[in-house]
Image: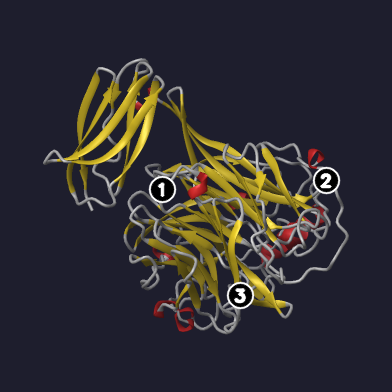
Amino acid sequence: MVKNLLTILLVSFVATYSVAQETILKKAPLKSVEPTVNEKFVPLSFESPKTAANYVAVDTMANSFGPGSNTINPLYYDPVSGVVAVVHRGATTYALGSGELWWNWSTDYGTTWTRSETSVQNGQTPILARYPSMAIWNPNASTNMSELFGVFSWPELVGGAFGGLGWGVSEGLLQSSLAAIIQPPPLYSSNAPTFVNANYAFWTSDNQDNASLRLFRTNDFLTIEQIDPPTWASSRFGDNGIIQIGGISDDNNNVYVGSIASFTEDIGAGGWEIGYSKSTDDGATWSDWFIPDWRQISATQDYDRLWDWLIGDAFVSYSGDITVDANGLVHLVTGLTDTSTGTNAIVEFFETAPGVWDAKIIASGTEVHDYSLYDNGADPGLGQTGPSIMIATNQARDFFVAQWTIGSPETGDTICDVYIKTRALSDNAWDNKQNLTQTDNMNENGCHLAQYLATTSSGGTTTDWLFSMYWYEAGNTTYLINQLNRSVVYVATVPVRVVSGVDDGLPLNTFELAQNYPNPFNPSTNIKYSIAERSNVTIKVYDMLGSEVATLVNQVQDAGTHNVVFNASNLASGMYVYTITAGNFTATKKMMLLK
């Protein structure tokens, strides 16, 4: 399994790579056109490999190129409705061509999947999509799938090369409602990540003509606004380059966009840093970039540049992601390198206050090496995604999962597996590393992660679940694949934290109302409660004048421990009370909202 000669050669190269490159390099281009091949049909029942996590075969693609960028978000979970969906390029067994986009959705947490009734383009030609992203927009916070919107964006080939920008929307996640291509100029680049808040759907594109970043937003899909923030101009990135790492919103509908770019700040060697920009008005205006000075943080001060996982070529290859916690503070994940020792680390930068940074090491040393099979040869999606460093959070935004792919550190081999670690917001360190794939001879060197976790409660136990994706040549269980052959999209739903109601201090088989946590809070908090028997439960929130401001629960529930999240983003700071009524049991507690 271990390719000893390749390992020795690459380890030797890493050991001699001790001088930081001072030339500011450009980002690596993604492949736009792949050769035409005959598809190899393998029945789905024979396509699922045996892995540690229960990866389910969702659908097929004509080849392995579709998800081959680590900056897109093809997999999305909506915590409110409980719907998970994935967008992908098609296969001619059901699609007009490999550039036609389809999506699959699941309402049972990824156990079973249904393909959309139409493609995203739905008859629009040409069909030359690459690297699609999606989000589920739920402006009414509905649990009814018919009220959800699937939002899609992608780079579109123009004249055989990147240049166009496609977008589409489905109403109800069943059929495409509308799709269009935004033609150049400017020449749009190869990534267009999608994100949403309660008011708008967004997508962004970095431009090939210069290093600027452009935002698109809409709240009706009839008018698409184009926004060019001054802080996103080419000069802010040294007129050199930008690698988007996605966007996300918080519970106050503020939106954040993360990027790795050749910012004008001079922090590490190589000339590229990681940071984010924030909007408090639904994307109309944007702040300057907040960039952690990681050389001044004790956990990361020994690392002198970002981790370029394809060292020695003419480009930079970086990976990263962004999320936001319950306090509206940003968390960034990426890789760093100490070129004096040839060691790497996957790190989390997180704010302790707006613009004030600290860091935690997620993985380092032998866990993060440079000799994994991230090549541009016969591997899924050309190996363009590299380690695919990504982060997800639960709906309460107080628990995180980091995911990446790398050659197995336990054996020191080059063949990649998919790994995760977890931490709660209050934890001092990342813990519980898990190998999700555990395949001895497959090279899962391309993966994605939904940015939100699912949270379920049953029998007094609360479980957080992640949604992980990878793709592989159909029917192949070796590390040597033909990336031009038909490929399968796999998604696994993995439990990452299980909390017993007893551990929360709520006894089973009794009535109890716990103190909310955190308290004080801004803007969301968790309220746990226990009921001794099946009862009609109501939980209401009142201000100090006795006026009702929210009804959190009003339904019949089974005996056991339950949890509800209270989002007070529309309320003013102050003291509030919450009251539970379950059968003959009532209880009231106070909580403090501090904004």
Instruction: From the viewer's side, name the closer residue of 11 and 267.
Output: 267
Mark 1 against mark 3, which lies toward the viewer? 1
Q: How many marks?
A: 3
- Residue denoted by label 1: 141
Q: Dividing the picture into quarters, in which one does residue 390 lie?
A: bottom right
**What whole-number distance in Å separates the C-alpha atoms at marks 1 and 3?**
33 Å
Q: Amino acid at mark 3?
A: Ser
Q: Earlier in the sequence, mark 2 or mark 1?
A: 1
- Give the left or right position of residue 444, taking residue 503 as reference: right
On screen, residue 410 above or below 166: above
Q: Secondary structure at mark 1?
A: loop
Residue 7: horizontal and vertical position, in percent? 76, 55
Q: Amino acid at mark 1?
A: Ala
- Residue denoted by label 3: 189
Residue 486: horizontal and vertical position, in percent? 81, 54
Q: Earlier in the sequence, mark 3 or mark 2?
A: 3
Instruction: From the viewer's side, name the closer residue of 289 and 137.
Output: 137
**What whole-number distance in Å separates the C-alpha atoms at marks 2 and 1?**
40 Å
- Give the left or right position of residue 330, taking residue 95 as reference: left
Q: Is residue 521 visible?
A: yes
Q: Quadrant of the N terminus?
A: top right
Q: Secondary structure at mark 3?
A: loop
- Residue denoted by label 2: 475
Q: Earlier in the sequence, mark 1 or mark 3?
A: 1
On screen, residue 205 above or below 441: below
